[in-house]
Image (tube, rainbow, N blue to C red):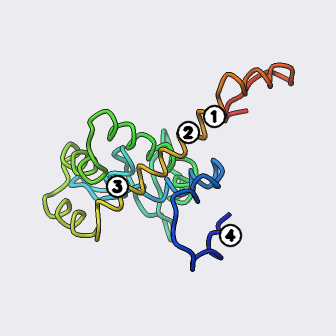
Amino acid sequence: MYRESAKRQNEEFSIDVFGEYDITVLSQLLGSFMPIVKLKKEDSYLVGAECKQITTRGENCMVRVGGGYVTIQEYYNKYATKQCVALYATMSSHNTPFLDTIIDLLEKNMASQEVIDAYIEEGENWESVNQLFVLIATFLEERLKALNSPKRRKSSKGKKGGKNSLAD
């Protein structure tokens, strides 16, 4: 799908292109918005919607999960979409845009004002970031609803297990 879109780069952009993407691609796109921002506490970072401890071990950047650590790449692959879905849920429940949601989380987790100001300045066009984030999250939400629709569940009853979830 990426290559097909890349071939069309001379064409005018349309949001319909997101409708062509499957759940995996939409999840990866949404996950690319996961913020990682330094907090005041040593080795603490806002990672998505949560405060996480990040440290280095040798050449690896490690994120604390449960009782151990995983590489930042493993963390991203496993949790980025979940973190961004949590951000989207917070945005929806508080009716706030992406930047305001991140700033609120940074303030709640005691980021320094310098870090907050730098984060705000880092983005060139926060309105576009917000619109794209919401657009991708909405397409992903629609795909997941379609996957779990009653019509889809009926067709899977006769199949082994009769379950229809992403964990299957």
- Label 4 sits on residue: 4
- Label 2 sits on residue: 142
Q: Earlier in the sequence, mark 4 or mark 2?
A: 4
Tell me the distance, in whole angstroms, between the alpha carbons under discs 1 and 4.
Answer: 24 Å
Type of amino acid at the residue the image marks with label 1 = Ala
Type of amino acid at the residue the image marks with label 2 = Glu
Classed neighbour count for the residue bearing mark 4: other residues with Cα under 10 Å, few (<14), some (14–19), many (≥20): few
Q: Nearer the viewer, mark 3 or mark 4?
A: 4
Tell me the distance, in whole angstroms, between the alpha carbons under discs 4 and 2.
Answer: 22 Å
- Label 3 sits on residue: 130
Q: Earlier in the sequence, mark 3 or mark 4?
A: 4
Type of amino acid at the residue the image marks with label 3 = Asn
Task: Tell me the SS state at disc 4.
Answer: helix
Type of amino acid at the residue the image marks with label 4 = Glu
Report x, y in % for residue 144: 60, 37
Q: In what quadrant of the picture does the N terminus appear?
A: bottom right
- Label 1 sits on residue: 146
Tell me the distance, in whole angstroms, between the alpha carbons under discs 2 and 3.
Answer: 18 Å
Classed neighbour count for the residue bearing mark 1: other residues with Cα under 10 Å, few (<14), some (14–19), many (≥20): few
Task: Tell me the SS state at disc 1.
Answer: helix
Instruction: Reply above or below: 126 against 135.
Output: below
Q: Quadrant of residue 105?
A: top left
